[in-house]
Structures are given as C-alpha cells and as structure tokens.
Image (cartoon, grey):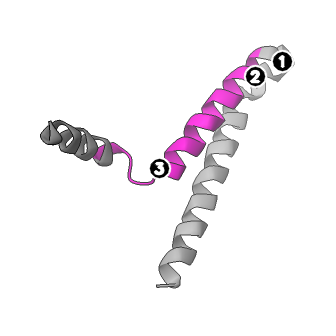
Amino acid sequence: MAWVKTTFSELVSLFVEDGSLAVAILAWLGLTAVVLARFESLSPWRGMVLFVGLAAILVENTWRRARADRGK
C-alpha cells in the first residue's frame, strides 16, 4: 500500500510545487466567487478583480521565494 501513497504524492507534485501558492489561489477563487455573486454591480469588473488578485498572489509568492533563495 505504500506504493499507492508514493504514486499519489508524485502525481500531486507534478501539478503542485508550492502548496501555499495553490492554497492561496483556491482561496482567492472561492472568495471572489462568493463576493462577486452577491454584488451584481461588480459584474463588468469580475475579470479585472480576478486577474488583479491572482497577479498579487503570484508577485507575493515570487518575492517570498526569492528572499528564501537569497538567504541560502
């Protein structure tokens, strides 16, 4: 049964290298889905809100990773 765990772990690592980035993206997608569904007046801005949030998450993750690599 250890091979099942190893196989699953390897499969997940193919798609998710940084777990915190994946969690932040999923949280942002969920948050924007809930909030934007409640406010119809934001309808024309949905794409922009989604893009800006995802871009901010990516920039923050990149800065954090660069600082960690520089500290090594």
* In the rendered image, the vertical position of residue 24 relative to residue 36, given as above or below: below
Q: Quadrant of residue 6?
A: top left
Residue hosting label 2: 36
At x 45%, y 54%, the residue is 18
Indicate the secondary structure of the residue bearing disc 3.
Answer: helix
Most foreground residue, 72 or 59: 72
Q: Is mark 2 on a helix, strand or loop?
A: helix
Instruction: Using the image, determine if residue 24 lies above or below residue 47.
Output: below
Magenta segment boundaries in residue numbering = 14-37
Whether residue 18 is in magenta: the answer is yes
x and y percent of residue 72 in the render? 46, 85
Separation of disc 1 and disc 2 at Cα? Answer: 5 Å
Residue 67 % position (x, y): 57, 76
- Percent x, y of residue 24: 59, 44
Circles 1, 2 touching at the beta carbon (< 8 Å): yes
Q: Could you tell me which secondary element the residue under label 1 belongs to?
A: loop
Q: Is residue 54 left or right of residue 49?
A: left
Q: Residue at x 50, y 44 (%)?
A: 22
Question: For the residue marked with disc 1, what is the amino acid?
Answer: Phe
Q: Which of marks 3 and 1 is in front?
A: 3
Q: Which residue is drawn at 62% across and 44% down?
A: 54
Among the two numbered marks 2 and 3 on one chain, the one whose residue lies closer to the N terminus: 3
**On the picture, is 53 further left or further right than 61?**
right
Check disc 1: other Cα within 10 Å, few if <14, some if 14-19, many if 20+.
few
Q: What secondary structure is the magenta-colored segment mainly? A: helix
Q: Distance between the residues labelled 2 and 3?
A: 25 Å
Please tell me how crowded label 2 is: few (under 14), some (14-19), or many (20+) other residues with Cα within 10 Å.
Answer: some
Disc 3 or 1, which lies upstream in sequence?
A: 3
Mark number displayed over residue 6:
none
In the picture of the structure, the residue carrying the numbered disc 1 is: 39
Amino acid type for the residue under numbered disc 3: Gly
Q: Residue furthest front?
A: 1
